[in-house]
Amino acid sequence: MPILRRRGWEIPESQVTAESLMLNRRGVLAGAGALSIGGALVAPRAARAQAAALTRNPTFEAGRDLTEEKFSTTYNNFYEFNDSKNLWKEAQAFKQRPWALKVDGMVKQPRTFDLDDLLKQVQQEERIYRHRCVETWAMTVPWSGFALSQLLALVEPLGSAKYVMFETAQDKSMHGLNAPFYPWPYIEGLAIDEAANDLAFMVTGMYGKPVPPQNGGPLRIALPWKYGFKSAKSIVKMTFTDKRPSTFWEAIQSSEYGFWANVNPEVAHPRWSQAHERLLGSDERVPTKLFNGYAAFVAGLYTDRKSEKLFM
Ligand code: MTE
C-alpha cells in the first residue's frame, strides 16, 4: 500500500518559499561570491584555491541568468538534515574533510580514494548547469568539478557492469536520519552509459568555492537532464553492478519517482504539472524543456529504451 505521508518537497512552492525569496529579483552574474555561506568556513585553504583557479567550459552555457548564490545555498533539499528547505545552518556542522570515496563492485580497480588525492588525478573545470527539481523550482549554478567519465577511466568498470549506484553520507550531524520513515542511506543510480555521458559531472565546487555542505559538499553529482533528486549529495560510495539499484525515492513511492526521471514537460507528476518551472529567487515562470534543454547531449541514450518509463 502506498505511503501517504506528505514529504517536505511535496508542499506547494508558495507555502515553503520564504517571503524574501519570493520577492527578490533574479540575477547576479558570473563570479558571484560576495555572499559565501558555509563552505568557505569549513574547507581547507588548498581546496578553496583549487576551486577558484578553474576555467569555465564554454560548451555548457545556461541560456539564462545565474541564480544568486544566496538563494541556491539557502533553499535546499537534503533530507538527512531535515525535510524543510531551511537546513543550511544545521548543515554547517557536517565535516567536509577528510573525505573518502569508496569505489567497488564490478570494476578492475576497486579503490578508496581520498578526495584531495582524487582531485589531483582528474582534470577539473567549471560548468554552468540548469537544475530542475520535480517540485518545479529551478536554479542555474556554476558548478566546478570533473566529468564522471574520468573516474570511470580510473577504476575501469567491467563489461558486465550495467549500472552504478551512489551511496551518500550518514553523519552524526544529520538529525533527519532519525526519521524512521525514510529508507536510509540515500541511494541513487545511473545506467553505465548515462554515467559515461559527458554531462554527468562530479561536483566539488560552486560559484568558484568548495560546494558547501547543504548543497552536497564535498562531493556530489550534477545530472542536469534529470530531475534534481537523481543528483545525489555528499557521495561516499559508488558500486558498479549488473542490477538496477533500488533508489531512495523509488523505494518510497515508485509510482511517483522512477529510476530514469528524465525531465519532460509533457509528463506530469501525479501531483504537479511539469510544463513550467519557477526560477529560484524570482517569481518568473518559464516553460520547461525536454531533457531540461539537454536533448542534444542525451536523447541518444534513450532511443533503445522506449519500453522503459523514462520520464518520471
Ligand atoms: N542527496 C541526498 N543525499 N539527500 C537528499 O535529500 N535531495 C535531492 C538531491 N540530492 C537529496 C540529495 C533533491 S530532491 C534535490 S532537488 C537536490 O538534491 C537539491 O540540491 P540543492 O539543495 O543543492 O539544490
Image (cartoon, rainbow, N blue to C red):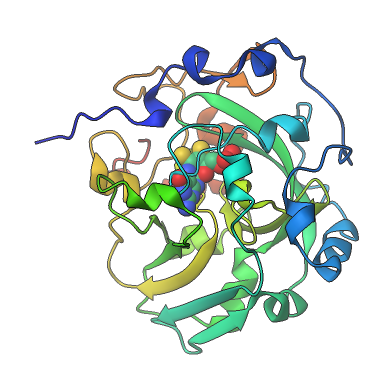
Residue 145 is situated, as x and y percent measured from the top left of the image, at: 72, 60
Horizontal side, residue 181 vs residue 305: left or right? left
Q: Residue at x 48, y 62 (%)?
A: 171
In front of the other: 53 or 55: 53
Q: Residue at x 28, y 57 (%)?
A: 246
For the C terminus, the quadrant is top left
**Does 256 appear above or below 94?**
above
For the N terminus, the quadrant is top left
Q: What is the quadrant of residue 41 in the picture?
A: bottom right
In front of the other: 123 or 115: 115
Horizontal side, residue 49 vs residue 259: left or right? right
Horizontal side, residue 163 vs residue 89: left or right? left
Q: Residue at x 88, y 57 (%)?
A: 52
- The count of marks equals 0
Residue 136 is situated, as x and y percent measured from the top left of the image, at: 50, 23
**Does 99 appear above or below 32?**
below
Horizontal side, residue 300 vs residue 184: left or right? right
In front of the other: 235 or 99: 99
Residue 174 is situated, as x and y percent measured from the top left of the image, at: 47, 53
Q: Residue at x 70, y 30 (%)?
A: 71
Residue 195 is situated, as x and y percent measured from the top left of the image, at: 51, 62
Q: Is residue 305 visible?
A: no
Q: Is residue 51 visible?
A: yes
